[in-house]
């Protein structure tokens, strides 16, 4: 795998930081997704769309419902995500659970280090 380095002004970096935070992504993941959307036309599972789906489906869960991250996406969408996209989504979910202890909790850690959550 190769790397590409870019330089940004302070103002450009602030814009990128804000956009990445809004999308629930690291700056690096956000920049990669933005570039790939631009050059490869990958828009069906844009990173921002994936994060919106995560938050929308979390809100739909009923109290007491147990779930893992992949439960929040259709089988078709989840099976077509890259490992990096799945990791980004998983980290965003874990962050959301940490920041909202009154709404979600860790239920168990399943074999394969899969974290199972429960909506409170």
Image (cartoon, grey):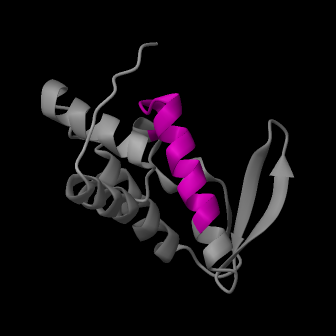
Helix, strand or loop: magenta stretch: helix
Kindly identify the residue that appears in the image at 34 percent across and 47 percent down: 47
- Kindly give the residue lying farthest to the front in the view shown: 9
Total numbered labels placed on residues in the image: 0
The residue closer to the viewer here, 85 or 116, is 85
Taking the image as shown, residue 88 lies to the left or right of residue 7, namely right
Relative height, residue 109 to residue 55 (above, below): above
Residue 52: x, y in percent?
A: 35, 62
Relative height, residue 73 to residue 22 (above, below): above
Kindly identify the residue that appears in the image at 64 percent across and 70 percent down: 97
Relative height, residue 36 to residue 105 (above, below): above
Residue 15: x, y in percent?
A: 24, 60
Taking the image as shown, residue 24 lies to the left or right of residue 12, namely right
Kindly identify the residue that appears in the image at 58 percent across and 50 percent down: 90
Taking the image as shown, residue 39 lies to the left or right of residue 108, namely left
- Kindly give the residue lying farthest to the bottom in the view shown: 102
Residue 100: x, y in percent?
A: 62, 80
Taking the image as shown, residue 60 lies to the left or right of residue 63, namely left
Kindly identify the residue that appears in the image at 35 percent across and 56 percent down: 20
Relative height, residue 78 to residue 89 (above, below): above
Q: In which quarter of the image is the C terminus?
A: bottom right
Q: Is residue 47 magenta?
A: no
User: Which stretch did the figure color magenta?
Assistant: 78-95
Residue 27: x, y in percent?
A: 40, 48
Q: Report which quarter residue 95 is drawn in.
A: bottom right
- Kindly give the residue lying farthest to the top in the view shown: 1
């Amino acid at each position: 795998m190769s790397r590409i380095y870019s330089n940004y002004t302070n103002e450009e970096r602030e814009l990128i930081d804000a956009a990445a935070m809004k999308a629930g992504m690291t700056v690096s993941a956000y920049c990669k997704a933005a570039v790939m959307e631009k050059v490869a036309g990958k828009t069906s599972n844009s990173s921002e769309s994936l994060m919106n789906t995560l938050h929308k489906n979390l809100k739909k869960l009923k109290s007491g419902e147990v779930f893992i991250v992949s439960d929040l996406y259709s089988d078709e969408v989840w099976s077509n995500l890259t490992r990096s996209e799945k990791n980004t989504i998983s980290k965003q979910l874990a962050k959301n659970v940490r920041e909202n202890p009154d709404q979600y909790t860790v239920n168990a850690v399943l074999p394969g280090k899969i974290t199972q959550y429960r909506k409170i």
